Structures are given as structure tokens and as C-alpha cells.
Image (cartoon, grey):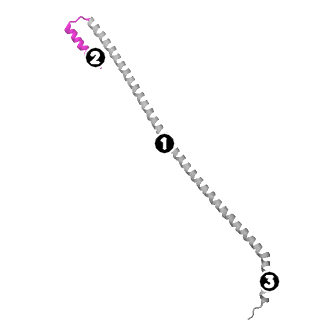
Amino acid sequence: MSILWENIVISMVAFLILFLLLSKYAFGPLFTVMEKRRELVKQQLDEAANSRTQAQAFVDEQKQALAAARKDAYDIIDQAKQTSVRQADDIIAQAKNETIRLKEEAARDIVSEKNKAVEALRNEVSSMSVAIASKILEKQVDEKDQSQLVDQYLKEVGGKQ
């Protein structure tokens, strides 16, 4: 078999013409489309990275907001506890003060009533003394009669109580 050089040259020239036509009309637009696709994919990857970064920042922000809300809630609870303890102490102090006031008032009332009773007893004793003296003056008695008279009046005083 013999090699035909003319066929090889014609095949090479045809291949070269085909390559030139393909590069001008097919490869150029194909490479342009592929480059646009590559840039689109690159842009989408960049956007995905940005979105991921933004999402992470948002998650971190939400965690901080949640931590702040928890801290505020704990502060409110702590403040409520302190307020309730303070109010309980105030109520206890007021009750103690009221108790002391009532005791003092009762003591004053007792002293007042005692003084009234002593005064009434004095008035009673003085009126009895006057009555005894008037009875003694009405009749002159000896010691025995006087002793009986005093005993009688003491019995009368004892009976009145």
C-alpha cells in the first residue's frame, strides 16, 4: 500500500480550513458562553459566601440579643425579689411600730384607769372617814363602842367592794 501524499495534504488543508471556520464561528461563541458561565458560577459562589457570612453575623447578633434578653429577665426577677424583701421588711417594721404604739397606749390606759381607781378609792375613803367622824361626833362613845363602830364601817366598806 502506498501512501498518497496528496490525500494527506488535502486532508490537512481541509482540517485546517475546518479548524479556522470552527474557531471563527463555533469556538469563539462557545468560549464566550463558557466564560460567562464561569463568571456566573463565580458570582454565585461569592454571593453564597456573602450570604453565609451575613447569616453567621445574624446568628451571632441573635445570640447576643437573646443573651441580653435573658440578662434583662434575670435582672427584673432579681429586682422583683429585692423589692418584695424590702416590702416585707417594711411591713414587719410597720407591724412592730404599731405593736409598740398599741402597748404604750395600753400602758397609758392602764395607768390612767389605775389613777382613776385610786382617786375613786380616796374619795370613797375620805367620804367614809367623814361619815365615821360625823357618827362619832353625833354620839360620844367609849373605846369599846368606838371599836365596834370602826369594825361596822369596815364591814360596810368590805361589803361594797
Residue shown at the point (66%, 64%) measured from the top left = 45
Q: Which residues lie in the magenta part?
A: 138-161
Give the Cα separation between the discs numbered 3 and 1. Answer: 97 Å
Q: Which is more N-terminal, label 2 or label 1?
A: 1
User: Residue type at mark 2?
Assistant: Val
Quick one: label 3, few (<14), some, or many (20+) residues within 10 Å? few
Q: Nearer the viewer, mark 3 or mark 1?
A: 3
Q: Residue at x 22, y 9 (%)?
A: 146
Q: Which mark is residue 157?
A: 2
Q: Nearer the viewer, residue 104 or 63?
A: 63
Q: CA distance from mark 1 to mark 2?
A: 66 Å
The residue that mark 3 highlights is 13
- In the image, residue 27 lies in the stretch drawn in magenta: no
Q: Look at label 1 and name its amino acid.
A: Lys
For numbered disc 3, what is the local secondary structure? helix
Numbered disc in front, either 2 or 3: 3
Residue under numbered circle 1: 81
Amino acid carrying mark 3 in the image? Val
Left or right of 117, for residue 43 = right
